[in-house]
Image (cartoon, rainbow, N blue to C red):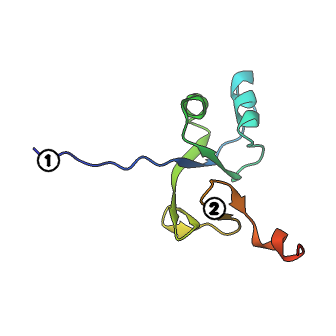
Amino acid sequence: MSKSTQVISKLHAVTQIRSGIGRPHWEKRTLKALGLNKLHKTVVHKNTPTVNGMLSRIHKLVKIQPVRIMDGKAVINGHVAPGPLLCSNGKFFHPKNAEGKN
C-alpha cells in the first residue's frame, strides 16, 4: 500500500471573482472581514479553521489558491507573486518600503 502524500498549504491566496451586490448580509460581512472589497482583489490568509469556515460560506464569490514559498518568494499558481517577499518569520517584507530607511 502506498500512501499518497498531500502537502497542505499554510497560506491561501483568496481572489474575489463575484460581486457582493445583491448577496445576503452575512456574505457581504464575510467579504469585508476577509479584506475583499473590489473584484479581482487578492489577499493572503493563513490556513486556519476560522478562515476556512469563512471561505466555505462565500466559496461561490471567491477563487482560492494555495500559496507556496520558494526561495523566499510567494508562488501562486506557478507564478511568482509581485511585490512583497515572505520572510522566515511569516511576515511580509516590501523592498520599496526599506529603500528610504537606513
**Residue under the image location 73 percent in, 43 percent down:** 36
**Residue under the image location 70 percent in, 59 percent down:** 92
Q: Is residue 57 left or right of residue 34?
A: left
Indicate the amino acid at tag 1: Ser
Residue furthest left in the image: 1
Q: Position of residue 12 (x, y in %)?
A: 56, 48
Label annotation for residue 43: none
Q: Position of residue 20 (x, y in %)?
A: 73, 35
Can you say which quadrant of the picture contains the N terminus?
A: top left
Give the Cα distance between marks 2 and 1: 34 Å
The tag earlier along the polypeptide, 2 or 1, is 1
**Residue under the image location 69 percent in, 28 percent down:** 27
User: Where is mark 1, residue-wise?
Assistant: 2
User: Where is mark 2, residue-wise?
Assistant: 86
Q: Quadrant of residue 45?
A: top right
**Residue under the image location 55 percent in, 48 percent down:** 11
- For mark 2, does the 10 Å Cα neighbourhood hold few (<14), some (14 to 19), or many (20 or more) residues? some
Q: Position of residue 89 (x, y in %)?
A: 63, 55
- Asked whether residue 1 appears in the rendered view, the answer is yes
